[in-house]
């Protein structure tokens, strides 16, 4: 008799592998593939086989290996936050420094990240480098979950949440907002969700403070220009192929 979890196991592994090493998953991400029980068994088997890792209770990933250093390449903090949000059905709002770091705008690494959400206060510590034999010291992501207030809830869970939070942090730090805008455009140009993020900014520009209007307009304009340039380039390549 065939193993009823084998197909579930293969499909789960394929989905995780496609997003490795950046993705983080929970059982909730695979309920379209199988029943909760089948998914749980498949994840346990994949973990025991060493095909995937369980860096924290209920969270799974598939780290890579750096060809340059031989060290483990594990998911960024943002991937763990987003996986917890999906698992617990939370709309989250991360603090400004964490948002800026997630977008690659600063090398400053927060010792702790504050995540505002409609949930009970708690702290989650994740050893992101668990299992890396070449790690000189563990990399710990400390996530402090706090209750969100109605005043700051608008951007929670929205595609553009990190953009708005990062810009606010840069302004508070008296850092160059022009540099932040350019960095955001550079980061989003490689993000497959950039159009969702840009549209979120366009649709909800009324919800940002007045000083941010021009910055948001610049970001969305530059992203649109890049998308248009990419489309024209693709058309040109297609035309050359026809000739």
Image (cartoon, rainbow, N blue to C red):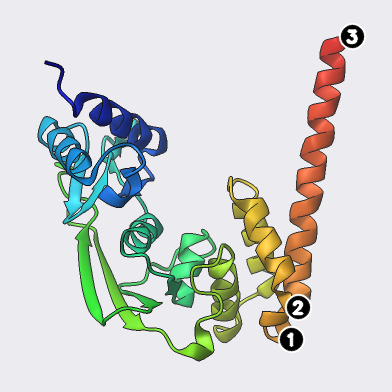
Whether residue 135 is visible, yes or no, is: no
Residue 198 position by quadrant: bottom right
Indicate the secondary structure of the residue bearing disc 2. Answer: helix
Q: Position of residue 123 (x, y in %)?
A: 22, 75
**Residue labelled with disc 1:** 210
Other-residue count near label 3 (Cα within 10 Å), few / some / many at <14 / 14–19 / ≥20:
few
Against 144, is 133 above or below?
above
Compare residues 154 and 96 and report the one nearer the observer.
Answer: 154
Residue for point 36% across, 59% down: 77
Q: Position of residue 78 (x, y in %)?
A: 40, 59
Numbered disc total: 3
Labelled pair 3, 2 in contact (Cβ < 8 Å): no
Labelled pair 2, 1 in contact (Cβ < 8 Å): yes
**Residue labelled with disc 3:** 243
Residue for point 19% across, 38% down: 38
Taking the view exactly as shown, the residue that stands out farthest to the front is 1
Q: In which quadrant of the rendered image does the N terminus lie?
A: top left
Q: Is residue 155 left or right of residue 92?
A: right
Residue for point 43% across, 71% down: 92
Q: Is residue 211 left or right of residue 152?
A: right
């Amino acid at each position: 008799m065939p193993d009823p979890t084998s197909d579930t196991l293969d499909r789960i592994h394929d989905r995780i592998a496609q997003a490795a090493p950046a993705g983080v998953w929970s059982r909730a991400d695979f309920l379209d593939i199988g029943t909760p029980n089948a998914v749980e068994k498949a994840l346990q088997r994949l973990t025991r086989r060493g095909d995937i890792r369980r860096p924290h209770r209920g969270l799974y990933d598939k780290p890579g290996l750096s060809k340059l250093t031989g060290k483990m390449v594990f998911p960024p903090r943002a991937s763990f936050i987003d996986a917890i949000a999906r698992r617990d059905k939370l709309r989250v709002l991360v603090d400004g420094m964490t948002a800026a770091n997630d977008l690659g705008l600063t090398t400053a690494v927060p010792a702790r990240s504050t995540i505002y959400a409609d949930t009970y206060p708690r702290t989650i510590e994740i050893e992101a480098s668990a299992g890396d034999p070449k790690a000189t010291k563990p990399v710990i992501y400390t996530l402090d979950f706090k209750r969100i207030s109605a005043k700051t809830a608008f951007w929670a869970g929205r595609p553009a949440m990190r953009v708005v939070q990062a810009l606010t942090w840069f302004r508070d730090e008296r850092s160059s907002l022009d540099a932040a805008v350019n960095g955001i455009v550079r980061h989003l140009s490689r993000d497959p969700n950039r159009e969702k993020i840009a549209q979120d900014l366009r649709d909800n520009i009324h919800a940002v403070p007045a000083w941010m209007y021009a910055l948001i307009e610049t970001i969305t304009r530059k992203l649109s220009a890049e998308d248009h340039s990419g489309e024209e380039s693709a058309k040109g390549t297609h035309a050359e192929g026809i000739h």
